[in-house]
């Protein structure tokens, strides 16, 4: 049998047959051992009296350069690597693409004592862009990255020429809606119990409306590998800290101050609502209504364009890349 055909069949079996628990990889606290789709670069800087390091991807245009730079901000349960297909499409369309891993996440350093805030992460992101001599960019934020992108645009409007929010969390204020507060110690105990099956179960339920495709396993393995590795305690600690950040630092109340054109790409099957698991049933049932939340956000943001994907969930760029990227490229082009 042809060797290339054999290799293809083996690869197909690897996708079709999920790894058993004992076969799943364990990664280091900075995702050591996980293969990123593009070379990781490092941004070394000082913050809160600490020497820190952010991993980031910097992918130059493959097609004819159009002179624009896009900054892709990952969600809490995602990494820069999750943007793989989007980076390839956008690079081929002539864009330079920067995709950082925020401090406390993925390939970046995991500091023990760090005051996490969206303002601080936005400040760090601006510092990275300044180190690359970038003065004007389009920012695309997904999930938690949408909250961060909004804060970046609010704090540094001169930097952000266009804002794109992809199923951002934080379109509602969960605390104001009646979700009880959980302190960092409580969140940490929950994070220590995180594993592949828990991550997959959560994403299947809230992100993909109960549906699952084998290719999603790669992104679950990416996250679960850090919880299975030698740095699992610091990974869990930073995740607890940032969960508290997400819950206590809403940006939705400031949407009226967003001054740049904003594109909302919203999968209607999404039901993500951090903290809903500890809320009273009546409260939990009304949270995460993304069709309604998307319309409300579009009404509050002065220059908003809403593009709904009624049949897609929390990660339309992963679930239906052709549909998502067609809408994204059109929205980016409309800025010109």
Image: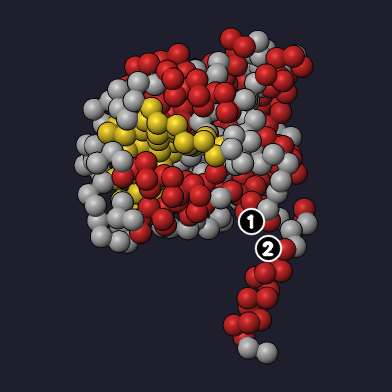
The percent position of residue 251, horizontal first and vertical second, equals 45, 19
Q: Is residue 80 visible?
A: yes
When the figure is inspected, residue 69 is found, relative to residue 183, above or below; the finding is: below
Label count reads 2
Query: Which of the 4 image quarters holds residue 333?
Result: top left
Q: Callout 2 environment at 10 Å: few (<14), some (14 to 19), or many (20+)?
A: some
Q: Residues within 10 Å of mark 1 (few under 14, many from 20)?
A: few
Res. 17 image quadrant: bottom right
120 left or right, relative to 66: right
Task: Give the numbered dot on residue 155.
Answer: none
Q: Is residue 104 visible?
A: no
Tell me if label 1 and label 2 are in contact, CB under 8 Å: yes
The percent coordinates of residue 201 (x first, y second) are: 74, 40
Task: Please tell me whether mark 1 sits on a helix, a strand or a loop.
Answer: helix
Instruction: Using the image as rendered, state which of residue 84 and residue 319 is in the foreground.
Output: 319
Residue 321, given in percent of the width and then of the height, sits at 52, 52
Quarter of image, res 259: top left
Mark 1 or 2 closer to N-term? 2
- Horizontal arrangement in the rendering, residue 179 relative to residue 124 (left or right): right
Image point (72%, 37%), residue name? 205
Tell whether 232 sits left or right of 250: right
Question: Residue 142: image x %, image y %?
Answer: 49, 37
Circle 2 residue: 15
Say which residue appears at 70% left-offset and 49% top-offset. Answer: 212
């Amino acid at each position: 049998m042809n060797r290339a055909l054999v290799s293809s069949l083996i690869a197909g079996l690897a996708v079709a047959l999920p790894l058993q628990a004992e076969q799943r990889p364990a990664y280091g606290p900075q995702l050591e051992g996980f293969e990123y789709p593009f070379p990781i670069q490092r941004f070394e800087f000082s913050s809160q009296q600490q020497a820190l390091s952010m991993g980031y991807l910097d992918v130059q245009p493959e097609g004819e350069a159009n002179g624009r730079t896009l900054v892709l901000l990952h969600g809490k349960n995602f990494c820069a690597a999750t943007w793989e297909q989007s980076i390839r499409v956008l690079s081929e369309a002539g864009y330079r693409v920067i995709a950082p891993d925020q401090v406390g996440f993925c390939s970046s350093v995991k500091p023990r004592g760090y005051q996490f805030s969206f303002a601080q992460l936005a400040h760090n992101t601006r510092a990275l862009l300044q180190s690359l001599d970038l003065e004007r960019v389009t920012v695309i934020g997904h999930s938690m990255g949408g909250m961060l992108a909004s804060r970046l645009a609010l704090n540094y409007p001169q930097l952000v020429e266009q804002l794109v929010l992809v199923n951002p969390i934080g379109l509602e204020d969960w605390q104001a809606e009646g979700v009880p507060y959980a302190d960092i110690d409580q969140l940490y105990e929950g994070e220590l119990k995180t594993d592949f099956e828990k991550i997959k179960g959560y994403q299947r339920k809230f992100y993909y409306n109960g549906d699952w495709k084998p290719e999603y396993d790669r992104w679950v393995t990416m996250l679960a590998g850090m919880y299975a590795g030698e740095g699992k305690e610091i990974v869990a600690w930073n995740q607890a800290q940032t969960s508290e950040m997400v819950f206590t630092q809403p940006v939705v109340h400031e949407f009226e101050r967003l001054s740049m054109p904003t594109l909302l790409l919203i999968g209607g099957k999404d039901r993500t609502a951090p903290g809903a698991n500890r809320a009273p049933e009546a409260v939990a049932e009304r949270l995460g209504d993304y069709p309604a939340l998307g319309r409300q956000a579009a009404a509050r943001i002065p220059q908003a364009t809403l593009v709904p994907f009624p049949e897609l969930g929390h990660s339309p760029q992963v679930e239906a890349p052709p549909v998502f990227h067609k809408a994204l490229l059109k929205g980016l082009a409309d800025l010109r």
